[in-house]
Image (cartoon, rainbow, N blue to C red):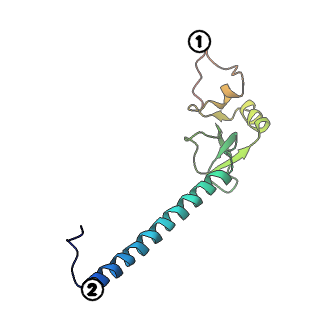
Amino acid sequence: MFDDLPPDLERLRTLRVWHALWLRRIDAQIAAVQQRQAEEEHGRRVRPAPPDWIVELGIGADRPPVQVHAGTCHMAGRRRQAVSREEARRLLATGLRACTHCEPDVQLHIIDLSAAPDGTHPIQP
Protein backbone atom coordinates (compact mmCIF):
# COMPACT_ATOMS: atom_id res chain seq x y z
CA MET A 1 0.00 0.00 0.00
CA PHE A 2 2.68 2.56 0.99
CA ASP A 3 5.61 0.99 -0.77
CA ASP A 4 7.19 4.36 -1.55
CA LEU A 5 8.23 4.73 2.12
CA PRO A 6 11.65 3.46 3.26
CA PRO A 7 11.65 -0.02 4.76
CA ASP A 8 13.94 0.65 7.74
CA LEU A 9 12.87 2.02 11.12
CA GLU A 10 15.55 4.75 11.33
CA ARG A 11 14.50 6.50 8.11
CA LEU A 12 10.79 6.12 8.96
CA ARG A 13 11.38 7.85 12.30
CA THR A 14 13.37 10.59 10.55
CA LEU A 15 10.46 11.18 8.17
CA ARG A 16 8.04 11.28 11.11
CA VAL A 17 10.12 13.95 12.89
CA TRP A 18 10.43 15.95 9.68
CA HIS A 19 6.67 15.84 9.10
CA ALA A 20 5.97 16.72 12.75
CA LEU A 21 8.19 19.78 12.39
CA TRP A 22 6.32 20.83 9.25
CA LEU A 23 2.96 20.33 10.98
CA ARG A 24 4.11 22.61 13.82
CA ARG A 25 5.17 25.27 11.30
CA ILE A 26 1.87 24.99 9.44
CA ASP A 27 -0.13 25.13 12.70
CA ALA A 28 1.85 28.21 13.81
CA GLN A 29 1.14 29.91 10.47
CA ILE A 30 -2.57 29.05 10.73
CA ALA A 31 -2.66 30.56 14.24
CA ALA A 32 -0.89 33.72 13.02
CA VAL A 33 -3.32 34.16 10.11
CA GLN A 34 -6.31 33.61 12.40
CA GLN A 35 -4.92 36.17 14.86
CA ARG A 36 -4.36 38.73 12.09
CA GLN A 37 -7.90 38.19 10.74
CA ALA A 38 -9.37 38.57 14.23
CA GLU A 39 -7.43 41.82 14.75
CA GLU A 40 -8.58 43.19 11.37
CA GLU A 41 -12.20 42.33 12.17
CA HIS A 42 -11.89 43.96 15.59
CA GLY A 43 -10.41 47.07 13.94
CA ARG A 44 -13.35 47.24 11.51
CA ARG A 45 -15.86 46.93 14.36
CA VAL A 46 -14.34 49.60 16.61
CA ARG A 47 -13.24 52.07 13.90
CA PRO A 48 -14.97 55.39 14.50
CA ALA A 49 -17.39 56.54 11.83
CA PRO A 50 -16.14 59.37 9.61
CA PRO A 51 -17.50 62.80 10.53
CA ASP A 52 -20.44 64.09 8.52
CA TRP A 53 -18.67 67.36 7.63
CA ILE A 54 -15.06 68.49 7.58
CA VAL A 55 -13.25 71.75 7.01
CA GLU A 56 -9.97 71.69 5.13
CA LEU A 57 -7.47 73.97 6.88
CA GLY A 58 -4.83 76.16 5.31
CA ILE A 59 -1.14 76.39 6.02
CA GLY A 60 0.26 78.65 8.72
CA ALA A 61 0.12 79.34 12.41
CA ASP A 62 -3.55 80.26 12.48
CA ARG A 63 -4.53 77.62 9.82
CA PRO A 64 -7.55 79.41 8.37
CA PRO A 65 -10.36 77.29 6.92
CA VAL A 66 -10.07 76.85 3.15
CA GLN A 67 -12.91 74.60 2.02
CA VAL A 68 -15.88 72.65 3.37
CA HIS A 69 -16.21 68.95 2.47
CA ALA A 70 -18.55 66.07 3.19
CA GLY A 71 -16.95 63.76 5.75
CA THR A 72 -16.29 60.99 3.24
CA CYS A 73 -14.83 63.24 0.51
CA HIS A 74 -11.50 61.89 -0.71
CA MET A 75 -10.55 65.28 -2.17
CA ALA A 76 -10.03 66.85 1.27
CA GLY A 77 -6.41 67.49 2.19
CA ARG A 78 -4.62 66.11 5.22
CA ARG A 79 -5.12 69.25 7.31
CA ARG A 80 -8.75 68.93 8.31
CA GLN A 81 -11.10 69.34 11.20
CA ALA A 82 -14.48 67.74 11.84
CA VAL A 83 -17.35 70.21 12.19
CA SER A 84 -21.03 69.94 12.95
CA ARG A 85 -23.75 70.38 10.35
CA GLU A 86 -24.57 73.82 11.75
CA GLU A 87 -20.94 74.93 11.63
CA ALA A 88 -20.57 73.69 8.04
CA ARG A 89 -23.71 75.62 7.04
CA ARG A 90 -22.46 78.73 8.84
CA LEU A 91 -19.05 78.57 7.12
CA LEU A 92 -20.66 78.13 3.70
CA ALA A 93 -23.09 80.98 4.38
CA THR A 94 -20.19 83.29 5.27
CA GLY A 95 -18.58 82.62 1.87
CA LEU A 96 -16.16 79.74 2.49
CA ARG A 97 -15.70 77.67 -0.66
CA ALA A 98 -17.54 74.39 -1.02
CA CYS A 99 -15.73 71.42 -2.52
CA THR A 100 -16.75 71.04 -6.15
CA HIS A 101 -16.38 67.28 -5.93
CA CYS A 102 -18.64 66.37 -2.98
CA GLU A 103 -20.73 69.58 -3.13
CA PRO A 104 -21.55 70.05 0.56
CA ASP A 105 -23.50 73.20 -0.27
CA VAL A 106 -25.95 71.11 -2.30
CA GLN A 107 -26.13 68.43 0.40
CA LEU A 108 -26.74 71.08 3.07
CA HIS A 109 -29.32 72.85 0.89
CA ILE A 110 -27.41 76.14 0.86
CA ILE A 111 -28.79 78.35 -1.90
CA ASP A 112 -26.02 80.15 -3.74
CA LEU A 113 -27.52 83.54 -4.53
CA SER A 114 -24.56 84.41 -6.73
CA ALA A 115 -25.09 81.39 -9.00
CA ALA A 116 -25.70 82.00 -12.65
CA PRO A 117 -29.33 81.75 -13.88
CA ASP A 118 -28.55 78.43 -15.55
CA GLY A 119 -27.67 76.95 -12.14
CA THR A 120 -23.91 76.70 -12.65
CA HIS A 121 -21.61 77.63 -9.80
CA PRO A 122 -19.44 80.73 -10.20
CA ILE A 123 -15.71 80.29 -9.99
CA GLN A 124 -14.62 81.36 -6.53
CA PRO A 125 -11.12 82.68 -5.90
Q: Is residue 56 left or right of residue 2?
A: right
Return the residue at label 1. Answer: 118
- The secondary element bearing badge 1 is classed as loop
Q: Residue at x 62, y 11 (%)?
A: 117
Which residue is situated farthest in the front direction here? 1
Of 50 and 43, nearer the camera is: 43
The image quadrant where one finds the C terminus is: top right
Crowding near the residue tagged with mark 1, few <14, some 14–19, many ≥20 C-alpha atoms within 10 Å: few
Q: Residue at x 58, y 18 (%)?
A: 120
Look at mark 2 in the image and give the residue it sits on: 9
**6 displayed left or right of 105:** left
Give the mark count. Answer: 2
Residue 106 in percent (x, y) is at 66, 25
Where residue 51 appears, as percent x and y from the top left, is 69, 43
Name above or below for residue 68 compared with residue 82.
above
Q: Residues within 10 Å of mark 2 (few under 14, many from 20)?
A: few
Q: Quick one: quadrant of the N terminus?
A: bottom left
The kind of residue tagged 2 is: Leu
Front in this rendered view, residue 85 or 32? 32
Residue name at image x 69 percent, y 39 percent: 53
Q: Residue furthest bottom?
A: 10
